[in-house]
Image (tube, rainbow, N blue to C red):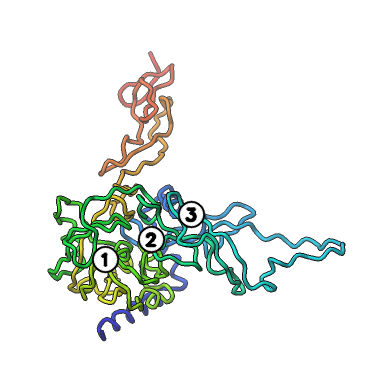
């Protein structure tokens, strides 16, 4: 315990020391390898409209800038949404009619509102409207619904309808695998019908985090060979009866939510299970289990998240030895599982595409017939090439050029005809 306390204290001090005037420079460095189109796609995927945003890209936490708002709108730092600028108050009407102050937060400390953002193939868990209280700045709790398997009458929560599972972004159609349902005494592999995740038996060979990840990548069990070491969201999904730590709970540590650093306020308290009835569908093995999620993409941070024996998140040096489960799924959303230039579509990693301007047009020539093409990543490079080649047959998907009518191609350039 003393060692863990020392590690966590040192980590938090290093995070605090990294904040301040140098943070913007660091954010620029983390996105140096990302083009504008990739950043735009990531921001759109996470429904971020503007401002600075932390997102997990290919397994690393990146600082992204999602742009500015249009004229007449300002970026709300709390929600990363473009909000209409407040206009000067109009002069009061010169009439004797009484003013309706029913929405004045100073006069009314609470209000009832309808919950919003219910996705397709989902249902409320349990209520579709809540009572909010004004804290002087905001109405709380939020009316924006979140997925949470634990029902509540005071929060806007939803679950997927029968026959669907939550993949961290949508309720997707689900077909049971036929494997036994995960519970403490079941033979592994087993399936969690809430998420569609299939879990291996616990691996009792003690390994460090990197070796555990490599072990799962090469694991073969139950006729499946596409196992991986679970990320922190997947590991949290096995918890039941712990309001903070279950999927959708207040614990902020999340791969899909773009937050795996330990710098968030109160993360230790909000990622701790205090409920005595809390349990894991994999059984409480009294073991600390590895996740694949690192606390930072910085090379000087060498810590990873674990699920400890109290079903709470904790930080361990990734070179320590620990136990783990391997996991696989056809449904769970995993941004970190795909390599560079691949995107998870909910069931597999698909090659990215991009729009590119054609290059290399020589003098006395014109494009035949497009000046921009759509490229697809083939695992090594983008194809077809954006560099033009001479070809008299027109194409709408390759960069081709031809000489002007009074010129001819001599194998190197367009020259005047004799």
Dot 3 or dot 1, earlier in sequence: 3
Q: Is residue 158 above or below residue 133?
A: above
Say above or below: 36 vs 75. above
SS label for mark 3 = loop
| Up-down relation of residue 191 to residue 349 (above or below) | below
The quadrant of the rendering that contains the N terminus is bottom left
Determine whether label 3 and label 1 are within 8 Å by CB.
no
Q: Nearer the viewer, mark 3 or mark 2?
A: 3
User: Within 10 Å of the Cα at label 2, are there few (<14), some (14-19), or many (20+) other Cα atoms?
Assistant: many
Marks 3 and 2, the one that precedes in the sequence? 2
Q: Quadrant of the C terminus?
A: top left
At mark 2, the secondary structure is strand
In this view, the residue in front, 258 or 219, is: 219
Please state the horizontal and vertical placement of residue 294, each as a whole percent of the image: 29, 67
Label placed on residue 281: 1
Q: Quadrant of residue 233?
A: bottom left
Mark 3, residue position: 118
């Amino acid at each position: 315990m003393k060692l863990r306390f020392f590690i966590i204290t040192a980590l938090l001090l290093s995070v605090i020391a990294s904040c301040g005037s140098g943070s913007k420079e660091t954010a620029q460095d983390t996105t140096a390898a990302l083009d504008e189109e990739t950043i735009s796609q990531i921001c759109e995927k996470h429904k971020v409209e503007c401002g600075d945003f932390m997102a997990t890209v290919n397994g690393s936490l990146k600082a992204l800038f999602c742009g500015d708002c249009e004229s007449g709108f300002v970026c709300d730092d709390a929600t990363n949404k473009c909000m209409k600028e407040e206009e000067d108050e109009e002069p009061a009407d010169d009439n004797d009619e009484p003013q309706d102050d029913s929405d004045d937060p100073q006069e009314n400390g609470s209000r009832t509102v309808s919950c919003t953002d219910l996705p397709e193939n989902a249902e409320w868990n349990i209520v579709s409207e809540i009572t909010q209280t004004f804290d002087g700045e905001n109405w709380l709790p939020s009316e924006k619904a979140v997925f949470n398997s634990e029902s509540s009458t005071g929060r806007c929560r939803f679950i997927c309808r029968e026959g669907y599972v939550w993949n961290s972004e949508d309720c997707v159609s689900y077909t049971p695998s036929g494997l036994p349902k995960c519970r403490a005494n079941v033979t592994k592999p087993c399936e969690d019908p809430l998420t569609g995740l299939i879990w291996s038996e616990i691996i009792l060979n003690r390994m460090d985090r990197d070796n555990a990840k490599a072990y799962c990548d090469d694991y073969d069990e139950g006729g499946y060979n596409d196992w991986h070491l679970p990320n922190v969201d997947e590991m949290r999904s096995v918890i039941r009866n712990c309001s903070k730590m279950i999927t959708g709970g207040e614990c902020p540590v999340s791969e899909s939510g773009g937050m795996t650093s330990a710098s968030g306020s109160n993360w230790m308290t909000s990622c701790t299970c205090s409920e005595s009835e809390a349990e894991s569908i994999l059984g409480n093995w009294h073991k600390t289990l590895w996740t694949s999620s690192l606390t930072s993409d910085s090379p000087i941070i060498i810590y990873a998240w674990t699920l400890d024996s109290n079903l709470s998140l904790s930080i361990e040096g990734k070179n320590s030895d620990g136990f783990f489960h391997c996991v696989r799924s056809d449904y769970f959303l995993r941004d970190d599982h795909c390599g560079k230039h691949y995107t998870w579509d909910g069931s597999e990693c698909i090659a990215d595409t991009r729009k590119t301007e054609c290059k290399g047009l020589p003098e006395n020539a014109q494009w035949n017939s497009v000046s921009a093409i759509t490229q697809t990543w083939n695992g090594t490079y983008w194809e077809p090439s954006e560099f033009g080649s001479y070809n008299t047959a027109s194409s709408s998907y390759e960069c081709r050029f031809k000489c002007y009518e009074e010129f001819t191609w001599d194998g190197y350039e367009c020259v005047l005809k004799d």
